[in-house]
Image (cartoon, helix red, strand yellow):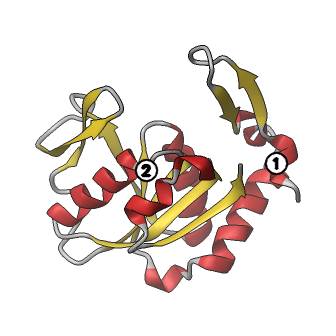
Amino acid sequence: MNLRDKIAEYPNFPKKGILFRDFSPILKDPSAMESIADEFSKYFHPKNIDIFAGIESRGFILACILATRYNKGMMMIRKAGKLPGKTTKISYTIEYGKDTIEIQKDIIEEGQRVLICDDLLATGGTAKAAAKLIEKVGGKIVGFAFIIELTDLNGMKGISKYDCKSLVKY
């Protein structure tokens, strides 16, 4: 299946000069979601993954699709202040300042193997921070799964030490 045909483009969103690539049309097509799971299943073996981590918020969807396919659990990496209970946080630099993401403190057991999922890889700042956060609590990064990669922004550079797979490259 050609997933590129199912990705919508919105010029000047969320601001002027940005071409937003939206995978939402994939979500209304069960065969497209199945195709995504099939493609990642060729790349990441289920016996090497204990849990899937979805980066807020569209990464939750991919993580759920893959967790269901692999019969594994799923966890959320959220923006600060969005999770109940005790959390572990990490702050990182973004284009015009800082941002913070967090996970629930007891969501990962020491040594658990985690595949981090997101819909899109741009500059890689959030992905890199997510890996550091999971490693901070004792998780082992299996790799990253992205539906879309914006290659001009060189996001893979910051996470190149990990096994990474993106399905559609622009």
Element class at badge 2: loop
> What amino acid type is highlighted by mark number 2?
Gly
**Residue linked to disc 1:** 4
- Which mark, residue 139? none
Residue 82 in percent (x, y) is at: 27, 29
Identify the residue at image location x=18%, y=74%: 110
Lateral position of residue 155 relative to residue 14, left or right: left
Q: Which mark is residue 124?
A: 2
Point out the frontmost of discs 2 and 1.
2
- Amino acid under disc 1: Arg
With respect to residue 59, does 169 lie above or below? below
Examine the image and state in which quarter residue 52 appears: bottom left
* Residue sitting at x 66%, y 29%: 20
SS at mark 1 in the image: helix
Q: Position of residue 95 (x, y in %)?
A: 36, 32
Q: Give the mark nearest the N terminus, 2 or 1.
A: 1
Question: Dot 2: within a 10 Å radius of its alpha carbon, few (fewer than 14), some, or many (20 or more) residues?
Answer: many
Q: Residue at x 72, y 21 (%)?
A: 11
- Most extreme residue toward the left, as rendered? 86
Quadrant, the N terminus: bottom right
Depth check, front residue: 14 or 142: 14
User: In the image, what residue occupies the spot 60% across and 48% down?
Assistant: 152
Number of numbered tags placed on the structure image: 2
In this rendering, the answer to whether 135 lies above or below 169 is below
Please identify the quarter of the rendering in which residue 51 is found: bottom left
Image x and y of residue 139, in percent: 25, 69
The answer to whether residue 10 is above or below residue 137 is: above
Q: Residues within 10 Å of mark 1 (few under 14, many from 20)?
A: some
| Residue 120 falls left or right of residue 32 | left
* In front of the other: 140 or 97: 97
